[in-house]
Image (cartoon, helix red, strand yellow):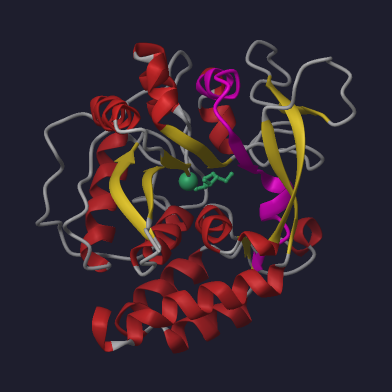
Amino acid sequence: MTPIPIIVDCDPGIDDTIALLTAFVSPELDILGITPVCGNQPLERTVRNALQVCELGRRTEIPVYAGCFRPMFREPIYGQFHGQTGLGNTVLPDPVKAVEKKSAVDFLIDTLIAAAALRKRITICCLGPMTNVAVALRMSPQIAEGIERIVMMGGAYREPGNRTMTAEFNVLADPHAAHVVFSSGIPIVALALDATHQVMLKPEHVAQFSSVSGRISETLAKLMAFWDRNDVRRYGSRGGPLHDPLVIAYLLAPHLFKTERARVFVEHESELCMGQTVADWYGKSGLEPNADIVIRVDAEGVIAFFLERLSRYAEKAVA
Ligand code: BDR
Ligand code: CA
């Protein structure tokens, strides 16, 4: 089978890191590039973290392109649950690998236009604020022709927000970018909090993961343990929601997810509801749906999927 060509747009980030580490050991995916953006941490840090994670995963051949250092219009906000460096209390060696000279936006434009010319399409995985993709779309709208679909983590529909009462972090961090992307007509699969809150990474899972993941087990255990929100009232159990890795699981094991199509609107003007994602479940707007929103996840299946993938770090080929 020909691998699926993807670009991973991200802001590592603990859960971004788990997503990347999973993608790295998945031969069904051809990772053309990683494009860190200002998000959980300032750009300089998300780039550094991406380089370090490539080294940890021994995938240093994957190019990393630095993205936008600020959101489109708003002031930056940063993540709250990723520690001072964005990688919890994990200390990774200084990266030897260097960031590419080309910017992420230029990389997106050049790669997607070249793909379109060859009648090929690339999947964009968005694990952070969507500034890079939105700016690329604003500069060269024809890149849409080279995009198969955008599989994004962000938003909150029937769930309340996680950064404000109404907004999820990735959308709130750049609501104008999310508005541009959802207005683009590009097929979108949306993994919002409605989906990610169904998959809690509990302390017992952390022990399981660290027992199977070979040479990355110590780092993975630290990252995962740091992710525990310890908020039983909110989530119904200890642990933390496995947000960004679900994008990779969706690509590789779509049978574990159920979606519903709807038109999505992004609030980018109101102070109270800034960054809210609103789904038109019952066709009130009269507009065509623009997204497949994940409404149900087989949580046990997804955990088993990640255990199998990350156990590949214990195998000789990647050890
Ligand atoms: C999203 O916010 C970030 O902090 C995580 O990395 C994830 O992408 C969840 O709201
Ligand atoms: Ca993220």
Side (left or right) of 200 relative to 75: right
User: Is residue 69 something one can see in this rendering?
Assistant: yes
The quadrant holding residue 102 is: top left
Find out whether residue 185 is within the magenta segment.
Answer: yes
Side (left or right) of 211 relative to 300: left
**Front one among 17 and 240:** 17
The x and y percentages for residue 298 are: 72, 67
Residue span colored magenta: 177-200
Question: Which residue does the image show at 45% across and 59% down from the upper left?
Answer: 19
Q: In the picture shown, does residue 54 fall above or below 206?
A: above
Find out whether residue 189 is within the magenta segment.
Answer: yes
Q: Quadrant of the N terminus?
A: bottom left
The quadrant holding residue 120 is: top left
The x and y percentages for residue 94 are: 15, 58
Q: In the image as oriented, which residue stretches furthest toward the front?
A: 119
**Front one among 148 and 309:** 148
The x and y percentages for residue 87 are: 37, 57
Side (left or right) of 35 relative to 14: left
**Front one among 316 and 278:** 316
Q: In the picture shown, does residue 55 fall above or below 205?
A: above
Question: Which residue does the image show at 82% across and 40% down from the upper left?
Answer: 158
Q: How many numbered badges does the structure rendering display?
A: 0
Q: Quadrant of the C terminus?
A: bottom left
**Front one among 22 and 145:** 145
User: Is residue 88 something one can see in this rendering?
Assistant: no
Q: In the picture shown, does residue 265 fall above or below 114?
A: above
The x and y percentages for residue 156 are: 71, 38
Question: Which residue does the image show at 76% across and 64% down from the upper left?
Answer: 232
